[in-house]
Amino acid sequence: ATVLHAPALRIVPLADDGELLAATKEIIDQAPDVVVATTAIGFRGWVEAAEGWGLGEGLLARLHQVELLARGPKVKGAIRAAGLSEEWSPSSESMAEVLDRLLEQGVDGRRVAVQLHGEPLPGFVEALRAGGAQVVPVPVYRWLPPEDPGPLDRLLDAVVSGGIDALTFTSAPAAASLLSRAQERGLLAELLAAFAHDVLPACVGPVTAVALQAHGVDTVQPERFRLGPLVQLLCRELPGRARALPVAGHRVEIRGHAVLVDGELKPVPPAGMALLRALARRPGWVVARAELLRTLPGAGRDEHAVETAMARLRTALGTPKLIQTVVKRGYRLALDPAADAKYADG
């Protein structure tokens, strides 16, 4: 695979985070009844930051006295590495199950400290407050947009143009940040359309998928919410999504940035890929130059740009007869006659 990656976030350094310092002092001064730890890296960072402020012993002593809930096995490991022990952890690694347990036990009049994992948990926090709890948010690490949005913008451009086959998300804040940036640039509708058709959105787990699902995006997720299984999932899913077309006696498969012709990978420039995708949406049908022009990235009004891009596409494919010129009408994929009936209805 060819990998294009971009940071969708940056993290506020914990040592400089005044909100975390204030929350830590509040917990040491007035013990909560329950502390909910949501991420391993966040819990470790919280303890390390407290030690840097000279509050480490006080924080650990206080956490020894409270009911400590861990969202999943990684968090349990971080809690035990700090010399603490958790009261309970859900088998699903789901905050929804943590919330159900707390509400079933009753939270009216109780103080519940919640370690936030990069973004607020409004549904979680509001449900606790509605149940009568006093909630102490602990912003263990906070996300902000990247200082340089250039790489993220290039990734967005590749997604909306169909230049990639799959986009992976490894955290909920990253997914939210990408959607926010797309909206800022006026690309949200195009991004959602790409996810619905050409680009496979893959999330490391259900928490990460929430922001996408709120926009109606169906995602794929591994059974185990880890990076390794996410990669294995892509290796299984992507080959099955490839569309093979019998064209001029050859087998053609279109990828995000290249084309397989009889199993041989042919790198194709972005403009050529845009043209080829437009032709492949209606294989065998003539596509007018004016329509092809609209698919070209950054195209103007000169249809000569289509001819230039088409010439480069044919050169890149190494098999010029794959695409036929239909005089005064446009271009078409030279679909083999036996396949015409299959694609006759578009």
Image: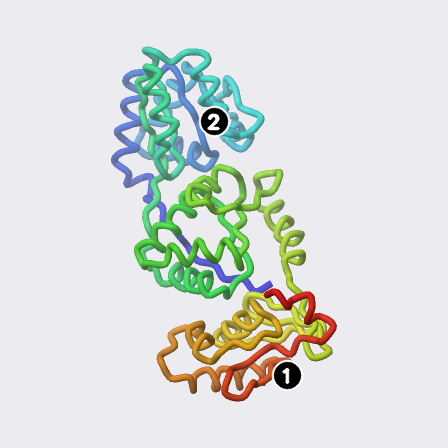
Q: In the image, residue 29 lies at what x, y percent?
A: 28, 18
Of residue 167 and residue 195, the one placed in the foreground of this image is: 195
Check disc 1 and give the amino acid type.
Gly
Q: In the image, residue 327 lies at what x, y percent?
A: 54, 88
- Pointer 2 or 1: first along the chain: 2
Q: In the image, residue 199 lies at what x, y percent?
A: 52, 57
Figure check: 260 above or below 302: above
Left or right: residue 247 compared with residue 302: right
Figure check: 343 above or below 70: below
Of residue 191 and residue 327, the one placed in the foreground of this image is: 327
Figure check: 346 above or below 142: below
At x 49%, y 73%, the residue is: 270
Check disc 2 and give the amino acid type.
Ala
At x 57%, y 42%, the residue is: 226
Q: In the image, residue 203 lies at what x, y percent?
A: 52, 45
Quarter of the image with the C terminus is: bottom right
- What's the mark number on residue 318? 1
Left or right: residue 57 compared with residue 39: left
Which residue lies under the disc numbered 2?
96
Q: In which quadrant of the rendered view does residue 239 lie?
A: bottom right
Q: In which quadrant of the rendered view does residue 16 lie?
A: top left
Secondary structure under badge 1? Answer: loop
Q: CA distance from mark 2 to mark 1?
A: 54 Å
Of residue 295 and residue 142, the one placed in the foreground of this image is: 295
